[in-house]
Image (cartoon, rainbow, N blue to C red):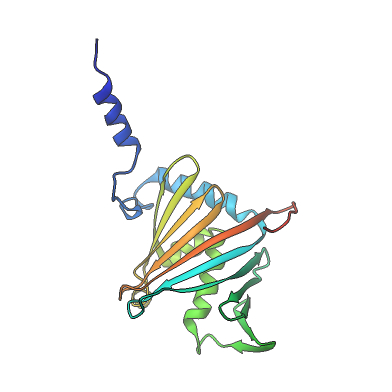
Amino acid sequence: MINRAPWLLLLLALAVPAAGESVFSYPVAENPERQRQLSTLAETMSATSRIEGRFTQTKHLQILEQPLVSRGRFSLDDEGRFSWEIHQPFPQAYHFRDGELIRSVDGEEERVAPADEPSLHGFFQFFSALLQLTEADLGVHFTRYFRHLDDEQWEMGLRPKDRRMRRVLDDMVVLGRGERIQAVTLKEPGGDRTELNFDYHREEAGTSGESP
């Protein structure tokens, strides 16, 4: 009788990513199949009229023993209106559309100029593209990496192309399931990192639904 166990172990080893291997071992540009997979996912995610849900942001700083945690709600519609409302620890809200950013604190609103807080403007521009997986925007600014972890779960890595951006961001890892992004981890050159976890409802164009 043929011993099939070694062959089964080999097939499993080939099918499952090696332990400790990162998404940055899977560049999109060098693999037509990864390009197809990412394009198919992006096409599905871009067919969205509204995204609305909750977020938890955890920032790990080298100078602090405990992370900084904030929670709130966000929404993004097909006209590019992006709202980011922080409920804890201190209430404040941001509303972004067509390059204009409005900050609201204690009922008072102020316009935030790009020259004054460029990183804040960059955050909203980037996440508008990321939540709908807009390939054109992401491909211009980042080298992309992509792999499937199983039938539903996928992982995307982003490394900035621009030298100025690399001064503040090493890389970014995006974890998703199906047509939703679950978590994003941003790593900075100095060792700090930010983790964003999302729980949201994605409304396709022509449909309606309730937010979580």
Compare residues 212 and 114 and report the one nearer the observer.
212
Q: In which quarter of the image is residue 4?
A: top left
Compare residues 194 and 28 and report the one nearer the observer.
194
Q: Is residue 204 above or below residue 92?
A: above
Compare residues 164 and 208 and report the one nearer the observer.
208
Count the labels in the image: 0
Q: Please state, as top left, top right, bottom left or bottom right, where the N terminus lies in the image.
A: top left
Give how far across and how far down residue 92 sits, in percent: 61, 81
- Tell me: 151 left or right of 18: right
Q: Is residue 198 above or below residue 151?
A: below
Q: What residue is shown at x 53% (from left), y 85% (from top)? A: 114
- Tell me: 130 left or right of 35: right
- Tell me: 211 left or right of 177: right
Give how far across and how far down residue 38 sits, in percent: 47, 49
Q: What residue is shown at x 53% (from left), y 67% (from top)? A: 56
Q: Is residue 76 above or below residue 212?
A: below
Give how far across and how far down residue 189 sits, in percent: 31, 74
Q: Please state, as top left, top right, bottom left or bottom right, where the C terminus lies in the image.
A: bottom right
Q: In this view, does 61 lie above or below 6?
A: below
Give how far across and how far down residue 122 sits, in percent: 50, 76
